[in-house]
Amino acid sequence: MACLVELHLHREHRPRPRGRPAGRHPRRRLHDRAEGLARLGHLSASTIASFEQGRRIPPPKFIDRADELLDSGGVLSASKEEVARAQYPAFFRDAARLEAEAVELHVYANQAMPGLLQTEEYARAIFMMMRPPMDDELIEQRVGARLARQEILSSRDAPLASFVMDEAVLRRPIGGRGVLRGQLEHILLMGQRRNVEIQVMPLDREENAGMAGPFTLIETREGRRIAYAGVQNVSRLLTERDRVRALEIKYGIIRAQALTPRESLAYVEKLLGEP
């Protein structure tokens, strides 16, 4: 975004053809446009400045509006995918791209709520706990990126998504009891979507095939089947068919060991009723 703003500055400073009125100073016009962007997106001038300087990543809708206001001829809008990838930590960018192309997503989580299901408050609490600590602007960037990812579940071409979560994830009070309660309520709402199935793996299960850790299975529109596993800021994309098939088999067993989707939502309601 910053380099594109500089492109506009360059265009504004080109020599003026003879006979054309001087008008306002180019940086004054840019300032006016920045104010227009702020009004358009209901954002503060400091937020617009952070977009321009590359300290924060603008959301896709803002980029489209900026393209119109700055009369960029589609240059800004065409950069949305590249900008979106920049929101994510380097280790997750390939997985985020594949996730956005998915027709099916299957997630097993035993540490924290899956990112696609997190509330804003829960996501912020997760990032605030990171060590070494993140600065405030990076936290807000990561939160915005995580919420933007979730749009795929409500898009017109939303993938079929299933999630299996250990009960410990539902009980761990990340961010405090109030944040957890809001997160559980959000889980109930997401579980009502026709393209989303949520299951809980109770702590009292004597068998759990997912003890090796969390993972995600992705199937793209082209029929590619890929697995993603990430821990301690290290991610692995598995494309070898044998390794992906092994995780697909494991996920099927995990689902069979967990509560059914209906039982799981009832269990979440039960947790909400506990003091």
Image: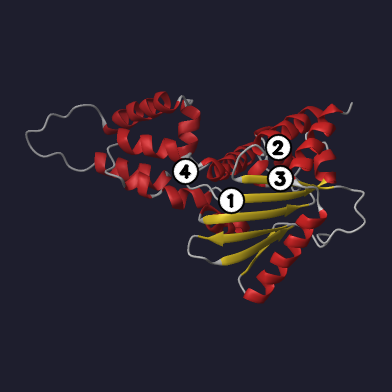
Quadrant of the frame with the C terminus = top right
Marks 3/2: CA–CA distance: 8 Å
Query: Disc 3, disc 2: CB below 8 Å?
Result: yes
Give the residue pinned by disc 1.
160
Q: How is the rendered protein coloured?
A: secondary structure
Give the residue pinned by disc 4.
156
Q: Which mark is residue 198?
A: 3
Give the residue pinned by disc 2.
187
Residue 141 as seen in the image, left or right of residue 45 = right
Question: Is the residue marked by circle 1 packed among few (<14), some (14-19), or many (20+) residues within 10 Å?
Answer: some
What's the residue type where badge 3 is placed?
A: Ile
Question: Is the residue marked by circle 4 packed among few (<14), some (14-19), or many (20+) residues within 10 Å?
Answer: few
Question: Element type at marker 4?
Answer: loop
Residue at the image point whose x is 30% and y is 45% from the top: 74
What's the residue type where badge 4 is placed?
A: Arg
Query: Disc 4, disc 1: CB below 8 Å?
Result: no
Question: Element type at marker 2?
Answer: helix
Name of the residue lying farthest toward the left: 19
Question: Element type at marker 1?
Answer: strand
Marks 3/1: CA–CA distance: 11 Å
Q: Is residue 176 visible?
A: no
Residue 40 as seen in the image, left or right of residue 99 = left
Q: Which comes sooner in the sequence, label 1 or label 2?
A: 1
Q: Quadrant of residue 265?
A: top right
Residue at the image point whose x is 66% and y is 55% from the top: 106
Q: Which comes sooner in the sequence, label 3 or label 2?
A: 2
